[in-house]
Image (cartoon, rainbow, N blue to C red):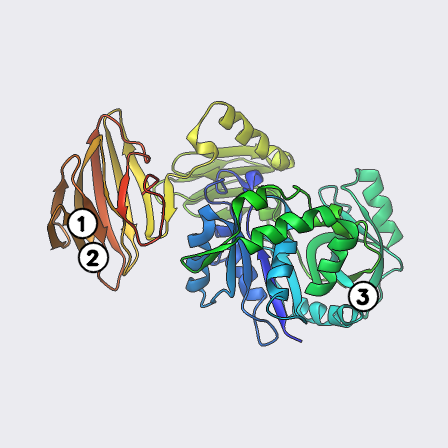
Amino acid sequence: MKIYPTILCGGSGTRLWPLSRQSYPKQFVRLIGDESLFQASARRLSGPDFAAPLVLTNSDFRFIVTEQLSAVGIDPGAVLIEAEGRNTAPAVLAAALHVLDRDRDAVLLVAPSDHVIPDTAGFHAAVKRGLGAVRDGRIVTFGITPTRPETGYGYLELADRPDASGAPIPLRGFVEKPDAARARAMISAGSYLWNAGIFLFRAADMVAAFEACAPEVLAPVRAALTGARPDLGFLRLAPDAWAQAPDISLDYAVMERADNLSVVPFGGAWSDLGGWDAVWAEGARDADGLGQSGRVSAIDCTDSLLRSDSAGTELVGIGLHNIIAVAMDDAVLIADKSRAQDVRQAVDVLRARSAPQAVRFLMDHRPWGYYETLALGPRFQVKRIVVHPGSALSLQSHHHRSEHWIVVEGTARVTVGAEVRLVTENQSVYIPLGARHRLENPGKVAMVLIEVQTGTYLGEDDIVRFEDNYARAAKAAL
């Protein structure tokens, strides 16, 4: 029985600000280890029993998804693009309908892209235990054996206490995030597990569950798939139909109403990294409970997390206890570890002030590479631009600015008007106001240049695009 991994890859991860932001959320960040959470999830959902992964994401993340999968040697089966977030119920239904159209016996394993599960072999064993229930027409969810009376997670109430076999157990009900007293009582009862938000089912059974429990979701999702159009290897769901789908979670739409649910207990380590306190708990710490990452110096610090994600910023802590300190080029977070869940409030405050740090990095990812702003003034901007081998920016022009490019690594193929030439390291080229121009990397290594913009307006919407390898709109960011 082939399993189709389905990875849900949206969300903004505001509780892990400033490292996680709307333009580059936590699933794409290297929070723990050398891979992003998304890459680690894709690896965990791969192997001889698995088909190529199906990914659901939004338009802004589509090239990040394929780039990160390529970096770990995984080819996606399909990438479905949501015009807007409509929560997990429409996303899961779209995946089920898409796969069912190709394989009537398909089994889907649906998982978020931002969880940490270190024991891949143990997780695969839990999935295999769930397949028996799936063959019997059950929809399976996975419950994590609690290690503490956690108030930040939802719980699954089981019909029986789990035994050592890890066999599927009928689900009695869902429990929303409890208060501390209720959490302690559930842990003592022994028949409650944390809700991991991971599901295993036959596609046909999930569609039938929507027909019985949430028929209002079916018509718009089916219409969005029927009207979907290919776009550079992606499948873009029809936006008008998708917008009509209810904004509802799978738990509310189906799982709390269906009567064929089972739970597979999983006793291995698990975290949804829902805050910096979770990053501290899951990461490496010394004997004093101190976690450090990047250019950090700590003096007499205990039970704290110090992290610098800026190559040019030294973070120094003295006498800190129970503190989270995260430094980046454009933002610094300092918080008591007990207030980690309140970081999202800081993002709300920054948004209210229209501070760009609320949603965007200085580093901006594009399908051809990325750029970062090094300096910004009233009539100038300096960027560092990195272009992947074989990639190219669009053929474009600007109404309000001229540009000067200096190549510092690799070789660029530069088009200015009718002239095309190669520009190598330590050479430069000037782009006059209004000139049609293009930047390409014909080499086999990344090409890096410094761009100096001058003009009356330097916004990313001052781009008129004439040709583009990535089929983007005529006026848009780089």
In the image, 279 versus 112, the foreground residue is 112
Q: Which quadrant would residue 137 be assigned to in this image?
A: bottom right
Q: Is residue 257 visible?
A: yes
Provide residue 124's location: percent of width, then percent of height: 66, 69
Q: Name the amino acid type tagged 1.
A: Val
Q: Do the residues labelled 3 and 1 touch (CB within 8 Å)?
A: no
Where residue 407 is drawn, which disc sits there?
1
Q: Is mark 1 on a helix, strand or loop?
A: strand
Where residue 350 is drawn, which disc sits there?
none
Residue corresponding to mark 3? 168
Q: How crowded is mark 3: few (under 14 residues within 10 Å), some or many (20 or more)?
A: many
In the image, 211 versus 35, the foreground residue is 211
Provide residue 412's location: percent of width, then percent of height: 19, 54
Residue at 57 percent across and 55 percent down: it is: 225
Q: In this view, does 285 lie above or below 342?
A: below
Residue corresponding to mark 2? 410
Q: Name the amino acid type tagged 3.
A: Pro
In the image, 450 versus 212, the foreground residue is 212
Residue at 48 percent across and 43 percent down: it is: 307
Residue at 56 percent across and 60 percent down: it is: 41
Q: Residues within 10 Å of mark 2 (few under 14, many from 20)?
A: many
Direction from residue 100 to residue 308 in the image, left or right:
left
